[in-house]
């Protein structure tokens, strides 16, 4: 079984800052991590490989430093990794990104000479939170998409999966190939072994560029020109007032609180 996982290197959300002038994320000097939802997707892929056999390939789109995230994936059970990178891909929104990643899947299939049976993605990235990329990849590839999956098993040419819904869990069935998205409730990602960590540090990460995909990609659908989404501004809300500390007994505190509410014209 050939399993492919799409992962993204994202800024650590505990360190995110917004440029007060440009209203954009400040990425310089901010530590990066594998998107937590993608880590759960990778864990699901590795567990499926351990049960059904086959191999796990990981693909990420980004600059050269994203190879660090790919090596982290290799250290916890992935067999092969590819970095999708090119200046022409810069400025891509979720639509263009999903299209590029779908072409990257086809390029990987061409390189390996084997078709992908299952694609795993995290349900969303913590830096964008749109949740649009994974379903869009499936649409570009013409694959069935199974979202919010908490567990799955293969039965012949079919997938039996449990999907998280508001009312609980529903059981769904689909024919291979499929694309599945994972949530944090899916599993707890494993830690890398020392051996896995050392081997991943020595691994070579091949790159997939526009030149490598020139025969299967439409350049009008990538980068800024292929991105209909326009972000006007990103900003943090300004604090308009500080809190008020009220001390005293129950009756005096209640009276003070009532005065504050009346003064603020809440009552």
Image (cartoon, rainbow, N blue to C red):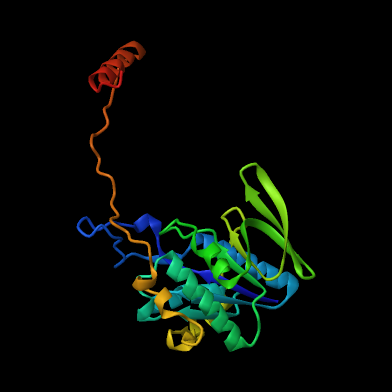
Residue sitting nearer the eye, 9 or 194 = 9
Q: Is residue 264 above or below residue 233?
A: above
Residue sitting nearer the eye, 166 or 239 = 166
What residue appears at the point 33 percent right and 61 percent down from the top-left corner?
Answer: 230
Spot the residue most to the left: 21
Q: Is residue 157 left or right of residue 82?
A: right
What residue appears at the point 66 percent right and 84 percent down from the top-left corner?
Answer: 114
User: How many numbered callouts?
Assistant: 0
Res. 141 visible in picture: yes
Res. 191 visible in picture: no
Which x, y percent locates residue 76? 58, 72
Residue sitting nearer the eye, 191 or 18 = 18
Choose top left, top right, bottom left or bottom right for residue 117: bottom right
Choose top left, top right, bottom left or bottom right for residue 267: top left
Quadrant (top left, top right, bottom left, bottom right) of the N terminus: bottom right
What residue appears at the point 50 percent right and 85 percent down from the top-left corner?
Answer: 202
Residue sitting nearer the eye, 136 or 206 = 136
Q: Is residue 99 left or right of residue 119?
A: left
Choose top left, top right, bottom left or bottom right for residue 3: bottom right
Q: Is residue 78 above or below residue 178?
A: below
Spot the residue most to the right: 156
Which x, y percent locates residue 110? 59, 87
Q: Is residue 253 above or below residue 14?
A: above
Which x, y percent locates residue 140? 54, 70
What residue appears at the point 25 percent right and 57 percent down from the top-left corner?
Answer: 23
Which x, y percent locates residue 6? 53, 70
């Amino acid at each position: 079984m050939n399993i492919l996982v799409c992962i993204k290197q994202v800024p650590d959300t505990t360190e995110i800052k917004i440029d007060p002038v440009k209203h954009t994320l400040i990425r310089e000097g901010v530590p990066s991590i594998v998107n937590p939802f993608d880590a759960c997707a990778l864990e699901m892929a590795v567990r499926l490989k351990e049960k059904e056999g086959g191999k796990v390939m990981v693909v990420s789109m980004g600059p050269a430093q994203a190879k660090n995230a790919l090596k982290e994936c290799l250290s916890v059970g992935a067999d092969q990794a590819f970095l999708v990178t090119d200046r022409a891909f810069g400025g891509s929104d979720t639509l263009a990104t999903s299209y590029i990643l779908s072409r990257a899947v086809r390029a990987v299939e061409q390189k390996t000479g084997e078709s992908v049976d299952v694609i795993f993605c995290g349900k969303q990235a913590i830096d964008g939170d749109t949740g649009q990329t994974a379903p869009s990849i499936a649409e570009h590839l013409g694959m069935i998409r199974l979202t919010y999956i908490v567990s799955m098993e293969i039965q012949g040419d079919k997938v039996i999966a449990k999907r998280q819904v508001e009312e609980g869990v529903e059981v769904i069935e689909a024919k291979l190939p499929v694309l599945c998205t994972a949530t944090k409730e899916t599993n707890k990602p494993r830690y890398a072994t020392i051996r896995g960590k050392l081997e991943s540090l020595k691994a070579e990460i091949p790159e997939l560029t526009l030149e490598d995909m020139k025969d299967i990609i439409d350049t009008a659908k990538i980068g800024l020109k292929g991105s209909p989404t326009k972000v006007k501004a990103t900003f943090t809300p300004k604090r308009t007032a500080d809190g008020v500390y009220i001390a005293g007994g129950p009756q005096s505190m209640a009276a003070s609180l009532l005065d504050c509410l009346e003064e603020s014209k809440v009552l």
